[in-house]
Image (tube, rainbow, N blue to C red):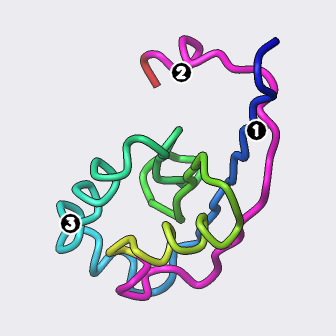
Amino acid sequence: MCAKEEPIMLWAISRVAGPKFAELREKLLEPHLDYLRSHKKILVLSGGTTADDGKEFVGSLLIVNVGSRAEAQAFADGDPFQKAGMFTNVTITRMRKGQWNPEAAEGA
C-alpha cells in the first residue's frame, strides 16, 4: 500500500497595480523575472493582468504550490515588484486544482 500523499496546496496571488507600477516596471523587470525563474519548482503559472484592450498592465496573477499561506505570502513578499511597493492590493487565496489544460493557453 502506498503512503498517503499530502494534498497539493495551490495558492492564487492576485495583485493590483499601484501608481508606481508603470514607472518601476521596466527598471525591475529583469530582477522580477530572475526571481520567478529561481522559484520554478513552486511557480505553477504567472502573468501580468491587463485592461480589456490588452495594452495597460493592471496587476499580476501568480499561482504557487507551497505548503501554507505563510509560504505563499513569503514568496510574494520576496518578489522585487512587491518589495518596491508596485501594488495597492495583494490577495492570497487557497485553491484546488480542478481542470488543467495548459494547451488551451498556447498562442495567448
Question: Left or right: where does residue 25 sit relative to residue 27?
Answer: right
- Camera-side mark, 3 or 2: 3
Q: Which residue is mark 3?
A: 31
Which percent across, then down, holds residue 16? 59, 72
Q: Amino acid at mark 2?
A: Ala
Which percent across, then down, holds residue 41? 42, 41
Q: Residue 69's mark? A: none
The extreme front residue here reads 1
Q: Which residues are magenta?
A: 82-106
Which percent across, then down, holds residue 51? 56, 55
- Camera-side mark, 2 or 1: 1
Q: Amino acid at mark 3?
A: Pro
Q: Is residue 94 above or below residue 79?
A: above
* Numbered circles on residues, count: 3
- Name the image quarter holding the N terminus: top right
* C-alpha distance separating marks 2 and 1: 28 Å
The quarter of the displayed image where residue 3 is located: top right
Q: Is residue 87 magenta?
A: yes
Q: Amino acid at mark 1?
A: Glu
The secondary element bearing badge 2 is classed as helix
Q: Which class describes the residues within 10 Å of circle 3: few (<14), some (14-19), or many (20+)? A: few
Q: Is residue 38 magenta?
A: no
Q: Earlier in the sequence, mark 2 or mark 1?
A: 1
Which percent across, then down, holds residue 103? 54, 11
Question: Left or right: where does residue 84 sit relative to residue 77?
Answer: left
Q: Which residue is mark 2?
A: 105
The secondary element bearing badge 3 is classed as helix
Q: Which class describes the residues within 10 Å of circle 1: few (<14), some (14-19), or many (20+)? A: few
Give me the residue at 22% from left, 56% from top. 34
Q: Which residue is mark 1?
A: 6
Q: Nearer the viewer, residue 58 or 61?
A: 61
